[in-house]
Amino acid sequence: MSDTQGGTSGSLRTDYVRKDSLTSFRTHVATLQPDLVRGMKELTGGNPFLEHVALLSAVAVYVKRHGGQQYFVLHSPSPAGSGDSWFPVVVDFERLQTFQDVLESMRQQLRAAYQSPSAAIGAGDCASPATLVSTADLHSDPRAAPVGLHVRILEASKEVSCRYSSDLYRSDTVADAVSGMVNILDLGLRAPAVELEKMWESGPADVSAVHEWNDTEIAYERDSTLQALVERTQAQLPDSIALACESRSYSYAELGRASGAIAAQLRANGLRPAGGVAIFAGRTFAAAAAMLGVLRAGGFYLPVDRLYPAKRAAYLLADAEPELVVVERRLHAELPETNCPVLCIEDLLTGDSSSGLPALDCPVAPAYLIYTSGSTGNPKGVLLDQRGRVNNFSDFNRRFQIGPGDCVLGLSSMSFDMSAYDVLGTFMAGGKLALVSEREQAAPSEWLELMQRERVSIWHSVPSLMQSLLDHVESYETVDTVPSSLRLVLLGGDWIPVGMADRIRAFWPKARIVGLGGATEVSMDSTFYAIDHADQNWKSVPYGRAMANQKAYVIGERGRLAPTGSAGELFLGGDGVGWGYHRQPGLTAAKFRPDVYSGGPHTRLYATGDLARFQPDGQLELLGRRDFQVKLHGWRIELGEIEAVLARYPGITRAVALVTAAEQGGPVLSAFVATSGELDLSALRRSLSEHLPYYMIPQQIVPLRELPLSVNGKIDRGRLVSLQPPRAAETPESALAVVVASVFAELLGREWVGPGADFFALGGHSLLALRLVSSLDDIFRVEVPLPAVFEFSTPAGLAAYLEREARARSIDLDQVVELWNSVNRMSAGEIDALSRQELRGGQ
């Protein structure tokens, strides 16, 4: 009855539930107190219809309080009492301020509905949210309710009865819900003109509990900096391996010399204290040394992902205005034009070390500038200081006992804040970082080889990357073949599938699994939850509790602490809150606010925009977003930015971006566009790839003549979700297209894919696109850049692209296709015999 995106089994939901999927029902009954019965009589005069209106109003207010939803629908039975028809009742809290307002809205809607029987819908057609409210006089048989939750007043005994599906809800959840509804009914009847917000203000017990849950203070080296702590490790463990990448290992002494040389050269080239340096590099030792070198020189670094479109990378460089840009020599040609001085990292490495230079260790100085998606059509930069990172990374190393014997697998992009811990936090702990190269980043089989070779003990990534690993090991590996060294799995940056922990334990039964939450604007991670077991009734893994020296508050609409169990906006604070948005003081003032709850001087909170609530045990439950920002495959995406870019395209008059479900069940980034004429989707994708990073390009684009509107004139996003993209026209097959289609089918888990089928419409996403690029390169030895997959997203389109590129390089693709077909015609025994023959021939 309340959740929007997630939650635990301790919450009610408003999502649609098929009646035939529910098999077990129970009933909870609460007796109304005599004062409440008298208040009901005074308000309604004993009229059963008005009693029903009062109960419907109480349920509506409870849904608002519990889930934070502003707009939803309840269902009320037809007065005929047959159970075959129901009236949808709209609840719009943007227009309702008092309980009296809610009563009047319910009364008017039901009165009008009863006078127009044609407005009723069939019992089998109740759409989301399917919550039913009735009285015994109107509907005496709750068994006819077509959903899992049915609330009614029993006329004879003045009780509230709630019949519910035990497939969906726990008994304590329903008991709490009924108690909450009855309390709201009591408060509303005694003071109907009181503002709704005041009906659920937090009491002393709630305030005390929140402060107890936020008592997270732990001593750490507040006056140290990231680079100072890494240098201490370098001095203590000079011969230990710090970094393994591209089949090479580098000691802490080598890392120290390289970062020191870079620091000295940056100073010599004019880098001032607290000045910015942009790093344009791959996933290499040079990139890691450059990050540390910038910090040792007293500056802060700005990572610019080489996979960004040129226009986006150019925007970052122009907006950040770094004092210097450092680039790997091999990537110099890819660097966008910039007015900043450009230095090659290789040249910096040949200079003298920084020994003898005065240290610039300031714990309140900036450490890095990370850009996230922005709702205005451009990304926004977030500036983070040293102290908050030292606290967060030190907490990680202490809490999870990470030290010199550990090896962390580095999978995250350098422009994603997870990589900051992978590099700097690992080096602070004296551990080893096994960095996945660009060649390996889309190949789980390569990850496994690296994990085995380097004895990786710690996995740290977004859930979608773990999903890719699990898909691979479940298809091609056994428990005996996977590396056994993994002891800790840290998952953050996105929703964690409930069943993922069990899938991990099937291969790594002793691994500790932890869910992490937070925002780039505060700390890499601000909350944690140890997934000791996964309750299959969860819709998502709980968000957990605040980490060391960090705070989490759930704030109601008027700035008051929300009571336990009530929804509000999640605010994060403590040591870790960033400086704000680079060159955007207005946005900074709107999102970074004084912390009036902790009592500390000069402390601030960050308004995350997430809807959340505290459970009675102090665990946070995340419910969704207040705005239209989403996380997909670990990347935080402002849907408004995608919509702004789409709206600038000729012929598109309006655009909406949504996350929908793919045919295979996974999340899909979709765009619905209103267009005045025919739309060339290939040209549109090509244009989007010039302005947006690959993970923000919609996987499916649906052209419409006009976008559907709701009754209040807003775009009806719920109806958009039900619209399907037009079926792609079949394209004549070619032998090459058939091979590409077979690669599509393997990646997408399908038996067959047609030559005209769109990769993204079938459920492909940015991470699978990386694997597609890797697979095509392995087969054809023709490099396919990632943007080409978005532009030519069908087997036929990619086959034509491969043909053009192969001709330019004098590669005979016909031989490749013939060999592919020959192998595919072989039986498993023939392939095995051929392999043994080749092995004997090589001896």
Image: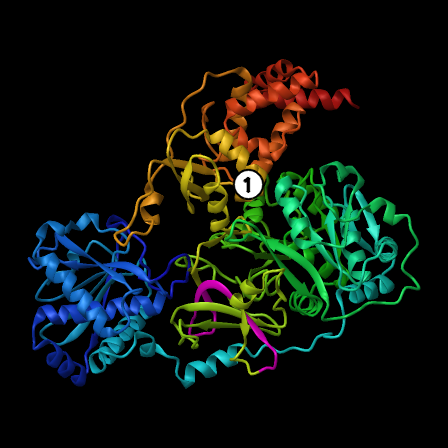
Asked if one can make out residue 78 in the rendered structure from this viewpoint, the answer is no
- Residue 589 percent location from the top left of the image: 54, 68
Residue at 93%, 64% (x, y): give it: 356
Front residue of this view, candidates 112 and 8: 112
Residue at 70%, 16% (x, y): give it: 810
Asked if one can make out residue 682 in the rendered structure from this viewpoint, the answer is yes
Image quadrant in which you'd find residue 101: bottom left
Residue 619 highlighted magenta (yes or no): yes
- Tell me which amino acid carries mark 1: Ser
Residue 49 highlighted magenta (yes or no): no
- Residue 124 percent location from the top left of the image: 19, 48
Residue assigned mark 1: 766
Q: What stretch is highlighted in magenta?
A: 600-621
- Residue 252 percent location from the top left of the image: 84, 56
Image quadrant in which you'd find residue 238: bottom right
Quarter containing the C terminus = top right
Residue at 11%, 81% (x, y): give it: 42
Q: Is residue 805 above or below residue 191?
A: above
Looking at the image, residue 205 sits to the left or right of residue 492; the answer is: left
